[in-house]
């Protein structure tokens, strides 16, 4: 009977801790997704205004961006959720009450283990399957929009500019054959020389597999004029092909080969075997491969950092907890970006550098748990607490 009661108390404890964690986890995850997505909205709104992209297509773009955003946000969400939960328990003296009842921080770990492991699994799934699917789908949709934009914006006997730096004037256009006749085209994509092209006909060609759009002109002349109008020349041709000039999004769409972020694990492994060791392409692909595992491990470790960090800050307010949690995540993220740049340049081997942020987290986790086991408060956090409470009292006229 006593054993059953003890088991029931443990289950109740873990349920209680879990219900403290999951609302914060979802809230922080949504906040991070919103912050990152808001940086993309300006570009997406520009597509709506200038390129006529439909709202449904914008929603699809957002859907394809989500796996990458959630993937990088999971470590922060795990840390903040666990940290804030244990911060509240500590501030309300609930952890102290549990310890007086014989329940240590280590006995509270099963719930944190479950949350951290779940976050790790979600991150691994997104890294291995979600991100390649999202990036590939993003570029495929962008190609479809670019391709349809070429066809829809072609007008007869008027000047039109379907893409940046390219101005057209045509006498007639066959939608069925995608054939333009009596073509005038001004190409200003070169910053030094302006090219004016006159041709009898031109045909639009698109390749969904390689995601390329080009215009093939026949029987024409190209006039070259430099920007200072000091020199001119011309060249006649029977057939000539031009790639369509596009903005940053469309340039990525038009790439002939898959980028590493679009590749599956097997494709990345094959790509790495083909590339020369130490070259930029090799380093980028190896970084992409290793980060599919290193970031999930970081999400797992973040949960265990949150327990001693929150438990040692005896304050009922959550503001300090959010600030401290953000500082820890920003340090991790800066370390991640810094090491990634060094690995891309070849200054540090990706096999070592990619795992450096995780090693930083592991050392931090062991250090914090060592202090927590010896009941040594983290003095920096305590000083922050005292300063915060002092400011609050002065703000409300409760003391000097």
Image: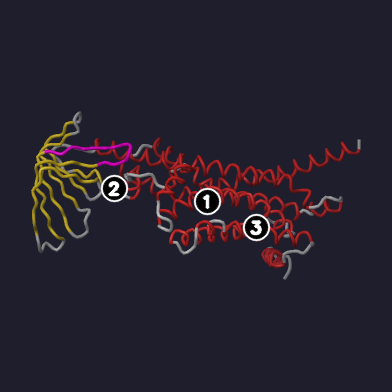
Residue at image mark 1 = 291
Q: Which dot, 2 or 3, sits closer to the camera?
A: 3
Q: What percent of the width, then of the height, locates residue 84?
A: 67, 52
- Counting residues from the start of the chain, the first of labels 2 and 3 encountered is 2
Residue at image mark 3 = 362
- Marker disc for residue 246: 2
Above or below residue 45? Residue 394 is below
What secondary structure is marked by label 1?
helix
Residue at 52% of width from left, 44% of height from top? Answer: 127
The residue carrying pointer 3 sits among few (fewer than 14), some (14 to 19) or many (20 or more) residues within 10 Å by Cα, namely some
Q: CA distance from mark 3 to mark 1?
A: 16 Å
Residue extending farthest bottom: 400
Q: Is residue 3 magenta?
A: no
Residue at 70% of width from left, 50% of height from top? Answer: 85
The residue carrying pointer 1 sits among few (fewer than 14), some (14 to 19) or many (20 or more) residues within 10 Å by Cα, namely many
What secondary structure is marked by label 2?
loop
The residue carrying pointer 2 sits among few (fewer than 14), some (14 to 19) or many (20 or more) residues within 10 Å by Cα, namely some
Quadrant location, the C terminus:
bottom right
Left or right, 148 with reference to 160: right
Judging depth in this view, the residue of 46 and 300 nearest the camera is 300
- Counting residues from the start of the chain, the first of labels 2 and 1 encountered is 2
For the residues bearing labels 2 and 3, Cβ distance under 8 angstroms: no
For the residues bearing labels 3 and 1, Cβ distance under 8 angstroms: no
Which segment did they paint magenta?
201-213
Judging depth in this view, the residue of 364 and 257 nearest the camera is 257
What secondary structure is marked by label 3?
helix
Q: What percent of the width, then of the height, locates residue 2?
A: 91, 38
Q: Which dot, 2 or 1, sits closer to the camera?
A: 1
- Marker disc for residue 70: none
Q: Quadrant of residue 137?
A: top left
Judging depth in this view, the residue of 68 and 91 nearest the camera is 68
For the residues bearing labels 2 and 1, Cβ distance under 8 angstroms: no
């Amino acid at each position: 009977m006593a054993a059953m009661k003890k088991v029931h108390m443990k289950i109740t404890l873990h349920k209680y801790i879990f219900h403290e964690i999951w609302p914060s986890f979802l809230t922080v995850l949504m906040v991070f997704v919103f912050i990152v997505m808001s940086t993309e909205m300006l570009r997406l709104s520009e597509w709506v205004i200038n390129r006529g992209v439909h709202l449904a297509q914008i929603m699809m773009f957002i859907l394809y961006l989500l796996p990458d955003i959630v993937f990088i946000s999971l470590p922060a969400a795990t840390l903040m959720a666990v940290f804030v939960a244990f911060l509240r328990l500590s501030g309300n003296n609930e952890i102290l009450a549990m310890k007086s009842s014989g329940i240590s921080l280590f006995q509270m770990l099963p719930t944190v283990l479950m949350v951290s492991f779940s976050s790790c699994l979600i991150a691994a799934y997104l890294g291995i399957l979600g991100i390649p699917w999202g990036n590939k789908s993003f570029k495929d949709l962008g190609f479809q929009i670019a391709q349809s934009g070429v066809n829809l914006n072609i007008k007869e006997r008027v000047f039109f500019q379907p893409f940046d730096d390219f101005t057209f004037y045509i006498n007639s256009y066959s939608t069925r054959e995608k054939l333009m006749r009596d073509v005038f085209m001004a190409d200003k994509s070169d910053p030094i020389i302006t090219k004016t092209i006159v041709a009898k006909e031109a045909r639009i060609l698109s390749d969904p597999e390689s995601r390329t759009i080009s215009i093939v002109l026949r029987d024409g002349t190209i006039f070259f004029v430099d920007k200072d109008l000091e020199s001119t020349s011309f060249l006649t041709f029977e057939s000539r092909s031009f790639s369509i000039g596009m903005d940053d999004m469309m340039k990525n769409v038009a790439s002939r080969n898959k980028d590493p972020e679009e590749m599956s694990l097997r494709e990345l492994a094959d790509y790495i075997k083909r590339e020369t060791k130490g070259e930029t392409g090799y380093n980028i692909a190896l970084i992409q491969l290793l980060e599919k595992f290193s970031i999930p491990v970081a999400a797992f470790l973040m949960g265990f950092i949150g327990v001693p960090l929150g438990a040692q800050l005896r304050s009922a307010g959550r503001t300090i907890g959010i600030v401290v949690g953000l500082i820890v995540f920003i340090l991790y993220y800066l370390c991640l970006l810094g090491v990634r740049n060094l690995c891309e340049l070849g200054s540090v081997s990706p096999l070592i550098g990619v795992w450096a942020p995780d090693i930083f987290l592991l050392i931090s986790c062991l250090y914090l748990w060592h202090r927590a086991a010896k009941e040594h408060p983290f003095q920096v956090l305590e000083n922050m607490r005292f300063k915060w409470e002092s400011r609050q009292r002065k703000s409300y006229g409760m003391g000097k």
